[in-house]
Image: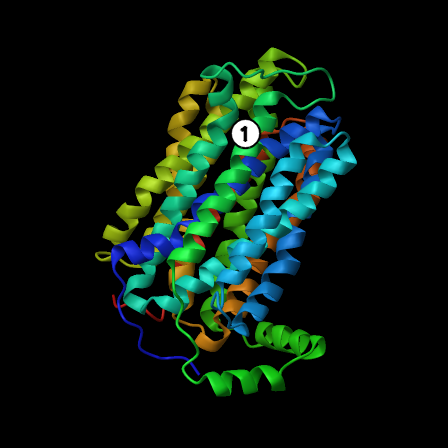
Amino acid sequence: MESTEKPRLGFWQIWNMSFGFLGIQFGFALQNANVSRIFETLGASIDAIPILWIAAPTTGLLVQPIIGYMSDRTWGRLGRRRPYFLAGAILASLALIIMPNSPVLWVAAGMLWIMDASMNISMEPFRALVADLLPSEQRTTGFAVQSFFIGTGAIVASALPWVLTNWLGVSNTAPEGEIPDSVRFAFYVGAAAFIAAVGWTVFRTREYPPEDLAAFEEMKRESRGVWFAVKDIFGSIATMPKTMLQLAVVQFFSWFALFAMWIYSTAAVTQHIYGTSDPTTALYNEGADWVGVLMAVYNGFAAVMAFVIIWLGKRISRKSIHGICLVVGGLGLASFYVISDPNLLLISELGIGLAWASILSMPYAILAGSLPPEKMGVYMGIFNFFIVLPQIVAASILGLMVRHLFAGEAIFALVTGGVAMMLAGALVYFVEDKDESR
């Protein structure tokens, strides 16, 4: 059905096909850096935040395999994956505009579901696109370029409230229960960036048609219907390759750590370093803005390290790269506990950025070589389970841990995440990389 030999693509072709991730990460970075802040502003308690966040991973769990399955069976004027890029971008941009205008907490929680689902519609096919268009020897480069755009988008998006406040004089505080203008305007900028960047990829990239279009159409006719889709997705789960199962364990601990960081960084930094938990104070909002800067730093370092990873990938094994990066990232996250000067957290973020660059590229480069090409989309969607499930676990237990085990001290959620990431680094060495030539 698909051509087994793919031509090598030029750097700018890889650049164009990955550019949409710049916009997608604008959305995710604004979400990661500001949604806890929005929830607290609208009255959420610290221990309730993880449950409110459970919307994000749950939507990914449902949406990504379905979109992957559908895109495997799509071919039209916009190709196979690009229709989903565009539809998701339109919906996500609208959600980004609405989210910071949520009048009450339940509206914000509902908008998180919609926003995350829309972003996942755009994001899932991007992973499959790299595997579709690039030969094995270029996949590390392809996923690393995606990492560069993810990092670059997140640098700007994470720091936007701070930039708007300190450079443009936009108000960073608001009356109780209202979202500051700096956050609202940042989300508006993110909406514009999302649709523009994804549109660039949609209209500047061409996909390979099915090798035998008649056979492809016949396959779609024979496999139509919801029941067949459900059977195929669950059948694919039951027969997933060994490499995918091994990576699943690594992904679980990696993404548990990341989710702990995303949902508790604001509370941990404002509590542990700035000494306040009151979102109506200028000190709290100063700390919350600094969290955005910290997230911009780790994403910026990840963008730079994405190209270093390409260079390293030609010299040492992908497993070694990934394992080392995860251990360094775990140490960076755990180090928040021993730091009292917020400026020194920038050093911690370099370790986290190194891990983030690897998490965004190496697992996918290792995985792609073990997957059947005709099921690339659905398997990339299923692989998201092992990103989503640890986030659901984290959302379910971290609030209880912070309340009952850590006496309300959010900093220990970050320490727990650091330990989990280091464990993931050790587990990488048990993964079989079928494409690895070393």
Query: Residue drawn at (44%, 83%), measured in percent from left and top?
Result: 1
Task: Please state, as top left, top right, bottom left or bottom right, where the C terminus lies in the image.
Answer: bottom left
Query: Residue drawn at (76%, 29%), measured in percent from left and top?
Result: 103
Residue 258 vs residue 99: left or right? Answer: left
Q: Amino acid at mark 1?
A: Ala
Query: Which residue sits furthest left?
Result: 315
In the rendered image, is residue 372 in sight?
A: no
From the top left corner, tell me how far across and down residue 139 is, in percent. Answer: 33, 62
* Figure quadrant of residue 434: bottom left
Nearer the observer, 221 or 235: 221
Residue 220 vs residue 14: left or right? Answer: right
Residue placed under numbered mark 1 in the picture: 186
Q: Is residue 339 placed above or below 154 in the rendered structure? A: above
Query: Residue drawn at (60%, 46%), measured in percent from left and top?
Result: 92
Label 1 CA crowd tier, 10 Å (few <14, some 14–19, many 20+): many
From the top left corner, tell me how far across and down residue 303 is, in percent. Answer: 35, 41
In the rendered image, is residue 61 in sight?
A: yes
Residue 281 vs residue 134: left or right? Answer: right
Q: Is residue 318 placed above or below 169 in the rendered structure? A: below
Q: Secondary structure at mark 1?
A: helix
Q: Is residue 269 placed above or below 322 in the rendered structure? A: above
From the top left corner, tell me how far across and down residue 140 is, in percent. Answer: 32, 58
